[in-house]
Image (cartoon, helix red, strand yellow):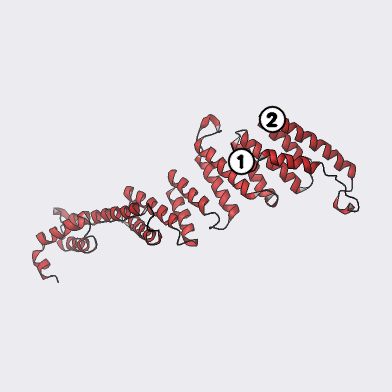
Amino acid sequence: MRHPLSLRLLRAFLLLSLCVPLLVAGDAESTSTNPLEDFQNFSETRAWVRQAEECLDRQEFKKAAKLYGKAAKLQKDEARKAEFLYLQAQTLLRARKPHAALEAYAALLQDHLYHIPLEHVFQQLRQLADDFQNGQGTFLGMDDPVTAIQIYKTLIQYQGDVKRSLDDRLTLADMQKEEGLVEDAVNTYQEIIKALPQDPNARYGLARLLDDTAAKRDGDGTIGKAAVREARRFLEIAGEDDPRREDARRIVQECRNREAERLWERANFYLTKYHYKPQVARRYLVDLQRDYDDTPAGRRAKLKLAELFPEKEEAAP
């Protein structure tokens, strides 16, 4: 597994930093009041680090992670402690221990936010989320999309700004959609659109999600109408060469077709023997002819009106 920050480079940096004298002449206030204790910690820390490196060379990553944890416990300085805990988290990731690695990264974000390479941590958390989603390194190779989703929520939480976290928010929405969390996915897309109304990716993603949902259930046509609205907005802001434009036009037409069929069924309902209300049926048919003339149901409505109400159709302007 590749990591943005080389472990070997970081290990070399740590060893160099450990070789810097802990006492600097004329700067007594910057050191502890017990130089011997600091020196003792230096010796122990160096021993743990060397053992960890030997384990890494043998690819004994789990043992190396424990040793980095021991080195971290010896550190009183928060920045130095964070360096070793970061090494521990990276090593747990290499050891294919995703739950332990996730716990380690979560602790780094919570307790050492200002002493870690944040962007590198974010990249490693994305890799960890991918491992959970695909069952890599998890018990019996089972997928764990719920944990993957939670990782992306954590990423968004620590990035804050919607523009900065845009890609992670879009990924989160896709994952929520795949897991059938339709309402959560809609909310994620709407949060993006509220902050970045001109973002075509969120508009298209939301349009597709609403279209898929409307095809399964849409009693009053509200979801389909929302899908049409988002697809049309996407077409307004997307580039002319955007390959998704054709699919957006398909969404608009299919949603209109479904809504027209719904109105057609209503019109025919009021033409049945036990629910016969021809004037109510006519209103539905007129709406179909006027608003959905580009759909099969709209064309059928035009013929039905001419058949059932020929005198009114002749009188119409």
Which callout, 2 or 1, points at the residue further toward the start of the chain? 1
Quarter holding the C terminus is: bottom left
Q: Residues within 10 Å of mark 2 (few under 14, many from 20)?
A: few
Q: Position of residue 279 (x, y in %)?
A: 16, 64
Above-or-below relation of 48 to 82? above
- Residue at 54%, 45% (x, y): give it: 150
Kind of element beneath mark 2: helix
Residue 185: give x, y in percent of width and height: 45, 51
Q: Amino acid at mark 2?
A: Asp
Identify residue type, mark 1: His
Figure quadrant of residue 3: top right
Residue 174: x percent and y percent? 45, 47
Q: Residues within 10 Å of mark 1 (few under 14, many from 20)?
A: some
The disc at residue 84 is: none
Provide the residue designation for mark 1: 3
Task: Determine whether, in the image, residue 34 is placed left or right of residue 176.
Answer: right
311 to 40, vertically: above or below: below
Label disc, if present, on residue 57 of the rendered structure: 2
Horizontal arrangement in the rendering, residue 174 relative to residue 13 (left or right): left
**Side of 120 relative to 146 (left or right):** right
Q: Is residue 270 visible?
A: no
- Seen as rendered, the residue at the extreme left is 311
Q: Is residue 282 visible?
A: yes
Q: Nearer the viewer, residue 107 or 242?
A: 242
Q: Is residue 87 above or below residue 314?
A: above
The single residue placed furthest to the front in the displayed view is 241
Work out which residue is located at the far right of the displayed protein and give it.
26
Determine whether label 2 and label 1 are within 8 Å by CB: no
Disc 1 element: loop
Q: Gap between marks 2 and 1, in whole Å?
A: 17 Å
- Determine the residue positioned at 56% across, 52% down: 156
